[in-house]
Image: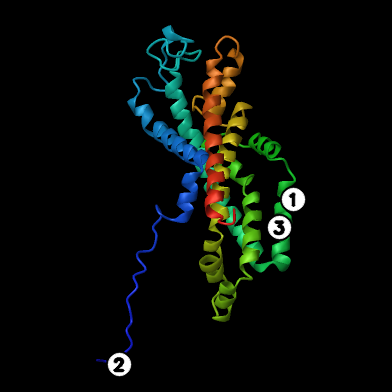
Amino acid sequence: MSGAPFVSEVSLGPAPGFWTSPGFRRFRRHKLAVFGTLTIVLLTLACVFGPMLLPYTDTFIDIRSRFAVPFSGPHILGTDPLGRDILARLLMAGRISLAVGFSAMLIAMCIGIVVGMVAGFYEGAVGAVLMRFVDAMLCFPSIFLLLAISALVSPSVPSIVILIAMTSWMEVARVVEAQIRSLKTREFAQAAVSFGASSRRIMLRELLPNAVAPIVVAATLNVAHAILAESYISFLGFGIQPPTPSWGNMLESAQSYLTSAPWLAIIPGAAITLAVTSFNFIGDGLRDALDPKL
């Protein structure tokens, strides 16, 4: 017999995938987050593909069916004062409002991540100057800042996206700055410094991936904030201008008919509430799923 020691083979099995990961299991247990995710997916699909399946476009005028009551005829959700189909306009408005929300979120996240990452990594004079600028921007109420700037800019979808992004990146910068400042003292970051890694590599390859959890949560909440911001500046007449529909300007045009045709305001208002609430639910679920300490 050989004197070599017996070594048993131990199979560790495959690494857990996304669908079996602890984070996804925690997210699934958050019922409101699952509801919010399904709602946003269905709402997005309806806004993208729904207008192609309807017999009416958002600009088609049926003058004989003005102020049609919902569920009382061929117009499922009724018509507006010009006889336009409310469902078609609601879905087309959803395209605009959701596009503004996601686009403004992407721009705001890019600005906030860059500013927060640089301020948290370098600290000192650079970090102090950047964060004092962030604090100064946060001193202005975003709604008044939005209205003041939008009154000076020709309203359009791109300009509204940029305006909302310019007034919503500061919270992201504060979150990222705090995370980067905490992570740069960890062993893996110090090891990268000792191996001579460049500052850019440390920030982008070592620190930023480890700060992704709060960034993802902030992104979902930022979409909700952008949709609300577009809604109230459009409601006040400074946002998306007719005939381009958005949930905000649908509310604005319905305020004269609150007593005679309340569905004109209730339907877009319900869409805004559903979208914003769903994104907030998703943010809560992601926070619980990505932070095991909770």
Farthest front residue in view: 1
Q: Does 16 sit above or below residue 64? A: below
Q: How far across and down, in percent of the image, does residue 205 sit?
A: 51, 67
For the residues labelled 3 and 2, the Cα–Cα distance comes to 67 Å
Label 3 packing within 10 angstroms: few (<14), some (14-19), many (20+): many
Q: Amino acid at mark 2?
A: Gly
Discs 1, 3 touching: Cβ within 8 Å? no
- State the residue at coordinates (44%, 28%): 91
Kindly state the secondary structure of the residue where label 1 is placed. Answer: helix
Q: Secondary structure at mark 2?
A: loop
Decide: is 88 above or below 117.
above
- Decide which of tag 2 and tag 1 comes sooner along the chain: 2
Q: Are marks 3 and 2 in contact (CB under 8 Å)?
A: no
Which residue is at the front of the view, 6 or 42? 6
Residue 57 position, x and y percent, is: 39, 22
The amino acid on which the numbered mark 3 sits, given as a three-letter code, is Met
Q: What label sits on residue 136 in the rendered view? A: 1
* Mark number, residue 122: none
Query: Residue 130: where, in percent of width, then height?
Result: 69, 59
Q: Marks 2 and 1, Cα distance to the nearest angstrom? A: 75 Å
| First reached walking from the N terminus: tag 1 or tag 3 | 3
Q: Secondary structure at mark 3?
A: helix
Q: Nearer the viewer, residue 58 or 265?
A: 265
**Which residue carries the number 3 mark?**
131
Q: Is residue 26 above or below residue 237?
A: below
| Mark 1 surroundings: few (<14), some (14-19) or many (≥20) residues within 10 A | few
Q: Which residue is mark 2?
A: 3
Question: Residue at position x 40%, y 18% from top?
Answer: 60
